[in-house]
Image (cartoon, coloured by chain):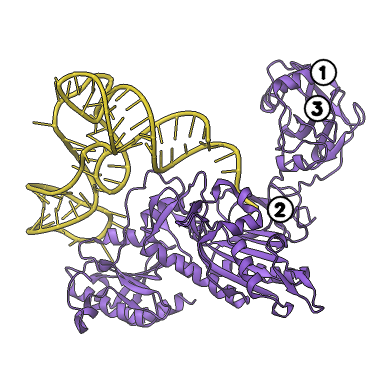
Chain colours: A purple, B yellow
Amino acid sequence: MPRGTVLGAGLCLQWPLSFTPSGFSAMRASRYLLATVKETPADAVVVSHQLMLRAGMIRKLASGLYNWLPTGLRVLQKVERIIREEMNNAGAQEVLMPVTQPLELWDESGRSAGFGPELLRFVDRHGNGFCLGPTHEEVITDLVRNEVHSYKQLPMNFYQIQTKFRDETRPRFGVMRSREFIMKDAYSFHLDQASLADTYDVMYTAYSNIFDRLGLNYRPVAADTGSIGGSGSHEFHVLADSGEDAIAFSDGSDYAANVELAEAVAEGERAAPSEALRLVDTPDAKTIAELVEQFSLPIDKTVKTLIVAASEDAGGGLIALLVRGDHELNALKAEKLPQVAAPLRFATDEEIRAAIGAGPGSLGPVKLPIPCLVDRSVALMSDFGAGANVDGKHYFGINWERDLPLPDTADLRNAVEGDPSPDGKGRLTIKRGIEVGHIFQLGTKYSEALKATVLDENGKSVIMPMGCYGIGVTRVVAAAIEQNHDERGIIWPEAIAPFQIALIPVNLKKSPRERELCEQLYSELTAAGFEVLYDDREKERLGVKLSDAELIGIPHRVVVAERGLDDGTVEYRARRDSDNTLVPVGEIVQFLRDNLRR
RNA sequence: CGGAGUAUAGCUCAGCCUGGUAGAGCACUACGUUCGGGACGUAGGGGUCGUAGGUUCAAAUCCUGCUACUCCGACCA
């Protein structure tokens, strides 16, 4: 403490905080590092980053590395607390593993080579290799193989809330994609797959509880189940327009999937031909947009013809992929097809001209000299237009099975808004999301590599199947802001707001009555268990205090003014509201109790 | 890792083209006025102009190397 006595009453008067039963302290703004800034920092491009800097939550130390200031840390710790409580409720046990890990373990799991430069490696003074842990599968598996030996101990689920380091090539968006970040990671160990599936379900529920309690609008989304199958993996996404992932979900069921993975279902039946096939000169129509504009052709009566490399199994060479003019090719789906080379490679203009004799702007299925796959939606088209495989010419009025045989069909495109849900219930809505959690049935990948085994009831050694379950704790904070803000600042969900109540006197210097009432309310509210930020700064005017409270996003505020004191009232306003409520001084504590039911 | 850009006060930026003793606004300190939605005046404090070298009588300014940071792309269990 900078000044004053360390003894008795002197300390009490100067001490900026009082402790509330929640464990988070109330604060006097005059003794607190608010660190708010008016101007938007130049190098922040996303709102959450801008607001976290402006609200005095974080400061950059170096690229992808951030200091957490008191306000930010309060939020972070509230998120951690909820996660911790729900993980404990779900039967997981908390541990803490080192950030620094011996490289030996990564050699043993085989990931040392695979992980690449994202794994930050270094050598200690004895010449031994270490790395900063980007994740902790190796360490936990090593711990468990040494400590757990009997099937009777299983299943067990361990978690930690710990700093991770990934040497991202390009850290960005503030705390959303930083190099150092905090993650809750859990690892479960089982005797068999059925037990793993049980714990997976428990974690799914726990995650739902966590994000419910955090007050976020989120979706569990089916993730790539490729190598594992079944309900092997879900991502939890916080919905926000700025999200990096597009996710598709049904309005009629629980179906939700990353757009990259969502099956695109075609509906309806192919109409009978009503137009004759005709060859049209289209010298200036090289793109779908030009075709639509110049010939007033509906875009869903056009077809895009994309030429890619065929797989070796299909004999190499080129293959044409056809999607409707208004649809997009999904590269992930395409390269999984047996006929298509993986990774997907588009043919060059020269290759196309050599194989087909026309340029990319004039391609189509009619008289196409190379193999062809069509999207399901394309198979249902009639009377459509496509290139004639002659420069400057298109066919209009094309009909399958009349003008040419229907090629093989496949799911080639991205699902779009309004598509039928793949589970047959409802239609797809597409929103953007921020991935904040991921649960995964790992299987025996690590337990096998590290020989984590247990004896079963027959005394036989069994490799333990594992599950792993992560939440990006620091990212949750940013995602919450992306989802909840306005032009004035952050609008925290109650559960993770740095403070619950802002107590703001209009003019402390002029009004001893305001001061007296504020002091009284501050101690009453604190005693009642509320986390109050009492803005007792004398040098700041009302406007500054109000906008700071709004920027920081404190959900409830109480303004104490001379004006109301004669009538014995104070002004209450919730962060989302635009009007004040006058509340009698004697009732304000109870009023807040009623409004802040947790 | 490829492409582009930036680096001047705590923050946002001007000055650089055309070389000549370092600037503004915000923030900070003191005093005064004001004070129910980011007040005003006066006086201050604060910068080896990212760094190393070169050209020059003289470099924030021109040239070269290096470093850091940002953006776009690739990458991201």
Residue nearest the observer in this picture, B22 or A236: B22
B11 left or right, relative to A143: left
- 2 or 1: tag closer to the N-terminus: 2
* Label ID, residue A279: 1
Task: Give the distance between the C-alpha atoms of the residues marked 2 and 1, in whole angstroms.
Answer: 44 Å
B44 left or right, relative to B9: left
Dividing the picture into quadrants, the one containing residue A257 is bottom right
Graded by Cα atoms within 10 Å as few (under 14), some (14 to 19) or many (20 or more), the crowding at tag 2 reads some
Is residue A436 at all visible to an observer of this figure? Answer: no
Task: Find disc 3 in the rendering and name its residue.
Answer: A317
Residue nearest the observer in this picture, A558 or A184: A184
Secondary structure under tag 3 reads loop
Using the image, determine if residue A312 lies above or below residue A351: below
Q: Amino acid at mark 1?
A: Leu
- 2 or 3: tag closer to the N-terminus: 2
Q: Residue at x 55, y 56 (%)?
A: A134
Task: Give the distance between the C-alpha atoms of the residues marked 2 and 3, in whole angstroms.
Answer: 29 Å
Secondary structure under tag 2 reads loop
Q: Residue at x 48, y 65 (%)?
A: A493
Q: Amino acid at mark 3?
A: Gly
Graded by Cα atoms within 10 Å as few (under 14), some (14 to 19) or many (20 or more), the crowding at tag 1 reads some
Quarter of the image for the N terminus of chain A: give it. bottom left
* Label ID, residue A221: none
For the residues tagged 2 and 1, is the chain the same? yes
Using the image, determine if residue A483 lies above or below residue B53: below
For the residues tagged 3 and 1, is the chain the same? yes
Q: Position of residue A162 (x, y in %)?
A: 51, 64
Q: Position of residue A544 (x, y in %)?
A: 28, 58
| Eye-nearest disc, 3 or 1 | 3
A552 left or right, relative to A373: left
Task: Find disc 2 in the rendering and name its residue.
Answer: A224
